[in-house]
Image (tube, rainbow, N blue to C red):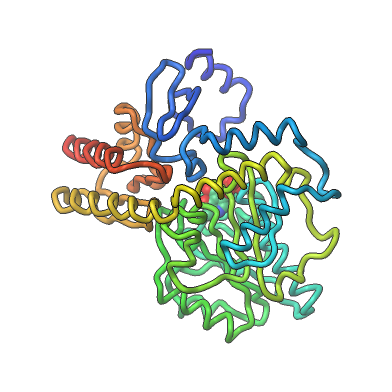
Amino acid sequence: MDLCEARKLDAKHVFGTYGRLPVMLVRGRGVYVYDSEGNRYLDMLAGLSVNALGHCNKRVADAVKKQIVTLSHVSNLYYTEPMIHLARRLNEISGMKKCFFGNSGAEANEAAIKLVRRYHSQILRDGRNEIICMKNSFHGRTMLTVTATGQDVYKKGFDPLPPGFKHTPMNDLGALEKKITGKTAAVMVEPVQGEGGVYPATKKFMKGLVSLRRKHGIELIFDEVQCGLGRTGKWFAYMHYGVKPDVMTLAKPVAGGLPMGVMLARGKVVKGFAPGSHASTFGANPVVSAGALAFLDEMREKQLVEYAGNIGNYFMSELSGLKEKRPEIKELRGLGLMIGIEMDADAKKAADFFLENGVLVNAVKPNVLRALPPYIINEKHIDLFVKLLDEFLETQ
Ligand SMILES: Cc1ncc(COP(=O)(O)O)c(C=O)c1O
């Protein structure tokens, strides 16, 4: 199928919910993907933070191939070994105690909200059910998670939205505390806001959340769907802040490119779920769990968490060098390999320029270009990115 036919058939058969770019990708290997016309692209977006190991990692592919011909799927009514190993490994690296598995980031966040609400309703019986979320946040597209999301653009047309959510600006402890009432169950935060335009939380704010937790008896939910699992140069972004959540959500890279979402919790809130209170047909089935175990093995063996931090520092320092020369770059934000470049220029045009020059990157906001490269990129790839950004800004 060529691109022209793909466009026609997609328009005819698929809901037009995505503003697709005029490229059909057909295969990938390492940091590169290839289109239907044989063009090669350096993938600095990694399937939106998914392909942390690059494309078609051999260890993940081998593990998935082996598992799919051994036991591909059974109901969660039975024990399966890959899931149990995976839960143990995730709890070990995160310091959490229990995992619930679903298939996406939104589902992981749904599970987090449900866990906290059920804990307050069935265990504490204190009538607290409100979740305070951050303005500019993003937590998913299901009804509950789109309501938790702090950007109106994603909510338009979906009324009535479920009740029980409030929003407050990130990094403003005073404003947050004013929103806390006797109905507040939890505060939900992305330690680094991704879809909002790449905004890391401040240390003061994150430390302050711990005091508020103690003072008001609320839970802290950290959404690490985009920033978790090595992307920021630590296994979890919360580790930069010396603050541990009660509930954390993961997805994107966790199963090496297969769909998986995980909600992890520790402390008393784990009592919130009991048999029958939550479920997912596909959650951590043997194939995705095998992919996830291979992802964790590869991360450990190749020391990719540390590498992501170091190469992320190189990326940021090269961009800072360019910022000195290019006043169009207004602000550089991020942690590790999660980078936002705010510009006095059209970020969509910049992303198109990168595409024409064989690099995938995305305009997360009209004036913010976002890079979420795989953890296996090297200096050469970054130098190319910075050179192209320089060339683009030259033409503005
Ligand atoms: C922080 C965060 N939470 C949740 C989600 C939703 O994840 P999914 O698209 O897998 O449902 C995303 C997706 O971009 C995200 O960035």
Question: Picture coordinates of residue 304 (x, y %)?
Answer: 44, 50
In this picture, is 379 found above or below 227? above
For the N terminus, give its image quadrant: top right
Q: Kindly identify the residue that appears in the image at 20 percent across and 48 percent down.
A: 328
Q: Which image quadrant for residue 196?
A: bottom left
The residue positioned 67% from the left and 59% from the top of the image is 88
User: Where's residue 87, x and y in %?
Assistant: 68, 56
Residue at image point 58% right, 33% down: 61
Location of the C terminus by quadrant is: top left
Taking depth in this image into account, of 205 and 166 the one nearest to the observer is 205
Q: Height in image: 71 above or below 299? A: above
Residue extending farthest left: 325
Q: Position of residue 124 (x, y in %)?
A: 77, 79
Q: Residue furthest front?
A: 301
Give the number of marks.
Answer: 0
Residue 270 visible in image: yes
Query: Is 385 drawn above or below residue 301 in the view shown?
Result: above
Q: Relative to residue 91, is residue 56 drawn left or right?
A: left
- Can residue 154 be seen here? no
